[in-house]
Amino acid sequence: MDCIFCKIANGEIPSTTLYEDDDLRVIFDINPTSAGHALILPKEHAASLLEYPAEKLGHIFEIAQKVGKSMEKGLHADGVNILANCRPAAGQSVDHFHVHVIPRYANQPEKDALVIETHEIPKPDLDALAKAIQENL
């Protein structure tokens, strides 16, 4: 497998490591949204959060919480985004599960803020949508 995030997570490609344990490595994003933007990279390959073993997700988000708190304290961030994109349609650009921890600053330019735009769409049948999801849970 020629996965760049596997290589970074397993120390084959140099990076600035903020935290590491047997299961993951936390590094700075080389294309940051804001100063301090970090990525949590599991050492075990999975295409996205949707394929990653559910029993290991708790540890990933425990570390995300610790990193986020450290950003607020150490970087004086006013908040953080913690997110995982799943599939290209949702913004995932590398086919390896990773979690972004993005420090946010009140004085940061609006263009750098994470914005999820809403649009007028035909009113969906919420019962039908719920049924389609519930049948696959």
Image: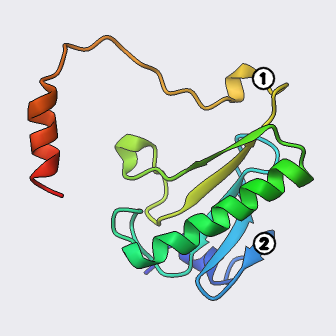
Q: Residue at x 83, y 42 (%)?
A: 77
Neighbour tally class for label 1: few under 14, some 14-19, many 20 plus, Cα within 10 Å: few
**120 vs 132, nearest the viewer:** 132
Disc 1 marks a residue whose amino acid type is Pro
- Whole-percent x and y of residue 93? 48, 51
**104 vs 66, nearest the viewer:** 66
Asked if residue 55 is positioned above or below residue 51 in the image, the reply reads: below
Q: Is residue 117 left or right of residue 112?
A: left
- Whole-percent x and y of residue 47? 39, 67
Marks 2 and 1, Cα distance to the nearest angstrom? 27 Å
Residue 136 in view: yes
Looking at the figure, which quarter contains the C terminus? bottom left
Q: Is residue 125 left or right of residue 70?
A: left
Pointers 2 and 1 in contact (C-beta within 8 Å): no
Looking at the figure, which quarter contains the N terminus? bottom left
Disc 2 marks a residue whose amino acid type is Thr
Residue annotated with mark 2: 17
Residue annotated with mark 1: 109
Q: Residue at x 9, y 42 (%)?
A: 131
The mark that comes first in sequence, 2 or 1, is 2
Neighbour tally class for label 2: few under 14, some 14-19, many 20 plus, Cα within 10 Å: some
Q: Residue at x 40, y 42 (%)?
A: 90
Figure coloring? rainbow
Residue 5 in view: no
Determine the secondary structure under disc 2.
Answer: strand
Q: Is residue 2 left or right of residue 47?
A: right
- Whole-percent x and y of residue 119? 36, 14
Determine the secondary structure under disc 1.
Answer: loop
- Numbered circle sitting on residue 78: none
